[in-house]
Amino acid sequence: MLAQVPSLDPWRFQFHPEVWVLVAFLTGSYIYMVRVIGPKAVAPGQAVVTRFNIGCFIGAMVMLWAASDWPMHDIGEEYLYSAHMLQHMMLSFFLPPLVLMATPEWLLRVLVGDGRLYRVVAFLTRPVIAAVLFNTVVVISHIPGVVSASLDSGPLHYSVHFAVVMSSLIMWMPVVGPFPELQISPMGKIIYLFVQSLVPTIPAAWLTFADNAVYTSYDQPVRVWGLSVVHDQQLAGAIMKTGGGIFLWAIIIFLFFRRFVASSFDYGNTYRRDHPVPDAELTGDVDVDTEAPLTTADVEREFARVPATDDRPS
């Protein structure tokens, strides 16, 4: 059970062994899959993982630990709803893409297979279904009654976080998922993420313009950094809208430039050619069997063939 009444010291250290066990389990499982299963699942000579995969996995584990352990977890669950919102942003916007980019295609195919589970994943990761599922979970997780109940119940609290992470993984699959056949086109990704950036506007505005405590569980006499409960809610709304929007729009701009600008610029400004330059163009020599040189006689013959016209005004 989570503590319902916080102590007088918001910054007291609280040890969460379940977080360390989870991170250790995920790390051990990843190492086992890469070292034991991976060499049997890829073609001979093919790399099991890349440095990019490993870097993303390390980043994902650091993100999971930072969002779930002291002090983020304790401040966010007992004092500041803005910290709670930042925690959810880390679990839904930052952690899932790192997890998916850390997962090689072979690893997910080993875990999912090609049967019923794969068909379920393919269905849930359709853009419309994934977006509706993700945003439904986000809305439910921010209902005042759900927030208050999760603060009083440990199992419910972790169940909400689990639902947020799983729905986020499904939402990000069409963008950076390991299965290329489930990813959408570059333009589709831009539109998909643009829509995702608009949805948080409604709950963010609700929090920003509320003039009383929406979440009474955070109306505590001890205030961290002197933030009142209303200012804390406003900050949470700003994090939800601005923080998520900036992150998604950064990805949108990156995808746009990579797909529509960088490729055109490189093609038009590179000194490289798609085909080798003919020797005749470099040396001035022409193969008489394939192309005869143009002479003065050829030009005079063409002028004589075309009838002359008098363009002078009458």
Image: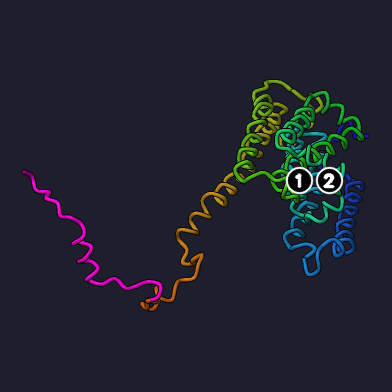
Q: Main secondary structure of the magenta part?
A: loop
Which quarter shows the C terminus? top left
Numbered tag placed on residue 69 in the rendering: 2
Q: Nearer the viewer, residue 228 or 293?
A: 293
Residue at 37 percent of width and 71 percent of height: 291
* Residue with the most extreme left position: 314
SS of the residue at dot 1? helix
Q: Which residue is mark 1?
A: 96
Residue at 83 percent of width and 39 percent of height: 120
Which quarter shows the N terminus? top right
Q: What's under tag 2, amino acid-wise?
A: Asp
SS of the residue at dot 2? loop
Residue at 84 percent of width and 34 percent of height: 160
**Residue 140, position as x, y percentages in the image:** 79, 27
Query: Mark 1 touching mark 2, by CB under 8 A?
Result: no
Decide if residue 189 is on the left or right side of residue 27.
left
Q: Earlier in the sequence, mark 1 or mark 2?
A: 2
Decide if residue 146 is on the left or right side of residue 253.
right
Q: CA distance from mark 1 to mark 2?
A: 18 Å
**Residue 207, position as x, y percentages in the image:** 69, 26
Vertical side of 176 occupied by 144: above or below: above
Count the marks: 2
**Range drawn in magenta:** 289-314
Query: 10 Å neighbourhood of mark 1: few (<14), some, or many (≥20)?
Result: many
Q: Quadrant of residue 205?
A: top right
Residue 291 in magenta stretch = yes
Decide if residue 273 is on the left or right side of residue 25.
left
* Residue with the most extreme right position: 1
